[in-house]
Amino acid sequence: QVQFVESGGGLTQPGGSLRLSCWVSKSPLSFYGMAWYRQAPGKQHEFVASIADDYSTRYDDDVKGRFTISRDDAKNTIYLQMDSLQPEDTGRYYCNTVPKTDWGPGTQVTVSS
């Protein structure tokens, strides 16, 4: 069973930045595509960004140009750099493999003035 440990969330003002990290127990991580998802209260998980084993990336239109996904396979970790955060980015952020497996605990991101 794969384990995910997400971190880096917090409270920030609109226009602020946060960098999320996710350690993944699956090894070698380089074999797998990875993705970030988020879940707002009362809503389903929604796709945010993904990075393939060849390092190609894909983003939801709502975050394109503001968020950057990256990976460090030597550390079994993926990252999500989030800039120009807006209140609508508020939610719990989760990483997962592609295709998805069980969810980890996630990390809360709150954007509010």
Image (cartoon, rainbow, N blue to C red):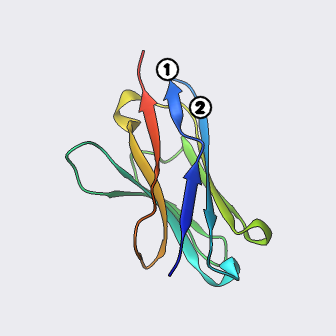
**Outermost residue, right direction?**
74
The residue at 49%/20% (across/down) is 13
Considering depth in this image, is 96 or 105 the residue closer to the camera? 105
Disc 2 on helix, strand or loop? loop
Give residue 49's position: percent from left, percent from top: 49, 58
Q: Which residue is mark 1?
A: 13
Disc sitting over residue 17 in the figure: 2
Circle 2: residue type: Ser
Q: Establish if 76 lies above or below 31.
A: above
Circle 1: residue type: Gln
Residue 29, by quadrant, is bottom right
Say whether marks 2 and 1 touch (CB < 8 Å).
no
Residue 30 falls left or right of residue 108: right
Disc sitting over residue 82 in the figure: none
Q: Establish if 30 lies above or below 69.
A: below
Give residue 68's position: percent from left, percent from top: 60, 50
Disc 1 on helix, strand or loop? loop
Residue 94 falls left or right of residue 9: left
Residue 102 falls left or right of residue 2: left
**Outermost residue, left direction?**
42
The residue at 22%/50% (across/down) is 43
The residue at 68%/81% (across/down) is 27
The residue at 54%/65% (across/down) is 4
Q: Establish if 60 lies above or below 2.
A: above
Q: Dot 1, crowdedness within 10 Å: few (<14), some or many (≥20)?
A: some
Give residue 16's position: percent from left, percent from top: 56, 25
Give residue 95's position: percent from left, percent from top: 50, 61
What separation in Å lies between label 2 and label 1 (alpha carbons)?
A: 9 Å
Quadrant, the C terminus? top left
Q: Establish if 7 lies above or below 110.
A: below
**Outermost residue, top direction?**
113
